[in-house]
């Protein structure tokens, strides 16, 4: 395998590129330091202004922070941009609306990556999953702007039974009303390959990584929340990705999890969880020696049957599903990778480089 630079685009502007994302191999969407969101067609070398993240309205927190870490999500021509660890974002849907404001509650937002996911339903209508509050997601039909989960309860399925079972084993000193609201911080969202489930890389008090999966149809149609617990570990915001519609890969460091006999030299691992009958269990584990795979971003490329890992520490690493390192490039540290397009994006002030991963 090798990584090849296929585009090196320098823009004739004094404005810095804050973040960028590809919607197709030929369409680049960028946020620039003026606050403008631009779509650039690579082959035609043509740029189009979409909207601005600046607002004439005054917000206590200042509104969208142009210089804060942000992510651009795309689905066809739809663009969603949010401040990852702040409160604001926008949806741009050509021929429908220029910018629809998203705004989540400020409760540990600086620790919870703004939950966002785009998908199409069975008849091709685009939908958005987004955060309303730390423990509260909404799903919106983007064609009609109807919030399909507007009346959804923040109570889990079987919450009453769980409470009564808890009272059998533990003394209740506070005697609070029950059942209590959903006690979970949603985090970065990832859709399964066929959009049947979405994964939340969130956390719970402790503080621990707590990764859950949710069935989209159930989340829309049922009043109560039903999660599928993947696992809980030390709070490291660990790398995670879908392998297929039933399998989730999670990065794991034995020494950080206080595993018996683990040492600082113990190789890190990837644990594969299988979802079945609304439960998950570890299907297998692989060891990955000599690299830090917990602190970074992980994707699965189906065509290459490989896991692609990227981070500011390790650069780019391509792994087989058995843990073999197929490629390692410590110098290249891209901002994003799109497994569907098999392309990396790296921004640098007024330029964007795009790289392709090739199976040689």
Image (tube, helix red, strand yellow):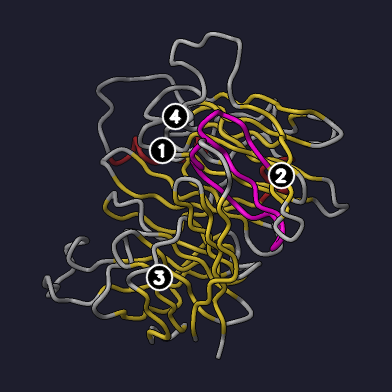
Tell me residue 269's x, y (percent).
Answer: 32, 74
Q: Tell me which residue sits at (43%, 45%) in the image.
A: 202
Instruction: Tell me if mark 2 has few (under 14), some (14-19) or many (20+) residues whose alpha carbon lies within 10 angstroms of its own.
Output: some
- Does residue 158 appear in the picture of this structure? yes
Q: Which mark is residue 63?
A: none
Taking depth in this image into account, of 313 and 133 the one nearest to the observer is: 313
Tell me residue 180's x, y (percent).
Answer: 45, 27
Tag 2 secondary structure:
strand
Tell me residue 17's x, y (percent).
Answer: 51, 42
Taking depth in this image into account, of 225 and 25 the one nearest to the observer is: 25
First along the sequence among labels 2 and 3: 2
Taking depth in this image into account, of 225 and 253 the one nearest to the observer is: 253
Is the residue under label 3 in contact with that under label 4 (CB below 8 Å)?
A: no
Q: Which residue is mark 3?
A: 316
Q: Quadrant of residue 239?
A: bottom left
First along the sequence among labels 4 and 2: 2
Q: Which residue is mark 2?
A: 47
Q: Tell me which residue sits at (66%, 30%) in the image.
A: 152
Q: Which residue is mark 1?
A: 112
Q: Which mark is residue 86?
A: 4
Most extreme residue toward the bottom, as rendered?
360
The part of the chain drawn in magenta is 15-38
Q: Mark 1 and mark 3: span between their CA atoms?
A: 25 Å
Tag 1 secondary structure:
loop
């Amino acid at each position: 395998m090798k990584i090849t630079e296929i585009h090196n685009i320098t823009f004739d502007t004094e404005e810095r590129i804050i973040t960028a994302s590809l919607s197709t191999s030929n369409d680049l969407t960028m946020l620039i330091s003026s606050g403008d969101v631009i779509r650039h067609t690579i082959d035609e070398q043509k740029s189009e202004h979409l909207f601005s993240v600046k607002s004439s309205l005054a917000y206590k927190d200042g509104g969208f922070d142009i210089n804060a870490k942000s992510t651009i999500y795309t689905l066809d021509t739809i663009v969603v941009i949010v401040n990852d660890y702040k409160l604001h974002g926008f949806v741009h849907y050509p021929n429908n609306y220029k910018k629809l404001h998203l705004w989540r509650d400020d409760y540990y937002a600086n620790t919870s990556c703004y939950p966002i996911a785009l998908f199409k339903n069975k008849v091709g209508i685009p939908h958005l999953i987004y955060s309303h509050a730390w423990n509260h997601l909404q799903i919106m039909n983007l064609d009609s702007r109807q919030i399909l989960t507007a009346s959804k309860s923040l109570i889990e399925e079987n919450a009453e039974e769980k409470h009564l079972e808890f009272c059998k084993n533990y003394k209740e000193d506070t005697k609070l009303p029950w059942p209590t609201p959903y006690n979970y911080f949603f985090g970065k969202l990832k859709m399964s390959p066929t959009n049947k489930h979405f994964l939340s890389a969130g956390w719970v008090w402790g503080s621990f990584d707590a990764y859950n999966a949710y069935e989209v149809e159930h989340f829309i149609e049922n009043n109560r929340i039903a999660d599928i617990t993947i696992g809980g570990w030390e709070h490291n915001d660990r790398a995670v990705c879908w392998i297929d519609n039933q399998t989730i890969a999670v990065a794991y460091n034995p020494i950080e999890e206080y595993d018996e006999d683990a040492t600082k030299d113990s190789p890190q691992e990837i644990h594969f969880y299988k979802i079945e009958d609304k439960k998950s269990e570890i299907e297998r584990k692989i060891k990955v020696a000599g690299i830090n795979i917990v602190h970074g971003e992980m994707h699965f490329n189906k065509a290459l049957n490989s896991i692609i890992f990227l981070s500011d520490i390790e650069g780019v690493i391509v792994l087989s599903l058995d843990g073999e390192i197929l490629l390692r490039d410590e110098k290249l540290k891209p901002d994003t990778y799109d497994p569907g397009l098999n392309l990396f994006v790296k921004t640098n002030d007024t330029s964007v480089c795009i790289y392709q991963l090739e199976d040689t």
